[in-house]
Amino acid sequence: MVKVISISAASLALLFGLGYFFTIGFVKPMSTDLSIIGQGKPVLVLAYENYSPDGGEALNLLQKVKGDYNSRLDFVVADLGTPQGFAFANLHKMFNGQAVFLKQNGEPLKVTYIPKNERELRSQLDSKLADVE
């Protein structure tokens, strides 16, 4: 009986470890470090509230395209559940699911919602980057 329980526990631990590796190992979480703003690289900041469908959809779409833009653009989340994220969103009059593009010097451009489809998002990012590069 003890052997069966030990094998079951080991199997569960292995499954948990593999799940963690595949989730975190392949999808790097979006940074919440707002201090990178104004440090010489454009930044897109998403106002995000945990467990919200709007913010979650926007975050998922940004995760999809982030790898293609990492060399030219930093992606950051203003987590509305933290004092820093809430203060940033309040300063820029942002709501959950909205984003703001900031120039290399930290100057904000227009606050907007993340488009619902990847093609439109890429088009907007390319346009904004062309304006600041």
Image: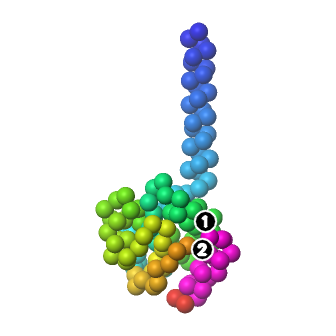
Q: Which residue is mark 1?
A: 61
Q: At 61% across and 34% down in the image, what residue appears?
A: 15
- Which disc is residue 115 wearing? 2
Per the model, the C-alpha gap separating discs 1 and 2 is 9 Å
x and y percentages locating residue 12 in the rendered image: 58, 29
The kind of residue tagged 1 is Leu
Magenta stretch bounds: 116-130
Q: Residues within 10 Å of mark 1 (few under 14, many from 20)?
A: some
**Considering only vertical position in the picture, is 18 above or below 47?**
above
Q: Is residue 41 visible?
A: no
Q: Earlier in the sequence, mark 1 or mark 2?
A: 1
- Which disc is residue 94 wearing? none
**Considering only vertical position in the picture, is 56 above or below 69?**
above
Q: At 45% across and 66% down in the image, what residue appears?
A: 96
Q: Residues within 10 Å of mark 2 (few under 14, many from 20)?
A: some
Q: Main secondary structure of the magenta part?
A: helix
Residue 108: image quadrant is: bottom left
Left or right, residue 84 beside residue 132: left
Left or right, residue 65 beside residue 45: right
The kind of residue tagged 2 is Pro
**Considering only vertical position in the picture, is 124 above or below 60?**
below
x and y percentages locating residue 97 in the rendered image: 49, 68
x and y percentages locating residue 77 in the rendered image: 45, 65
Closer-to-camera residue (91/38) = 91
Q: At 60% across and 65% down in the image, what residue appears?
A: 61
Dot 1: element = helix
Q: Is residue 117 magenta?
A: yes
Pointer 1 and pointer 2: residues touching (CB < 8 Å)? Answer: yes
Residue 88: image quadrant is: bottom left
Query: What is the quadrant of the N terminus in the image?
Result: top right
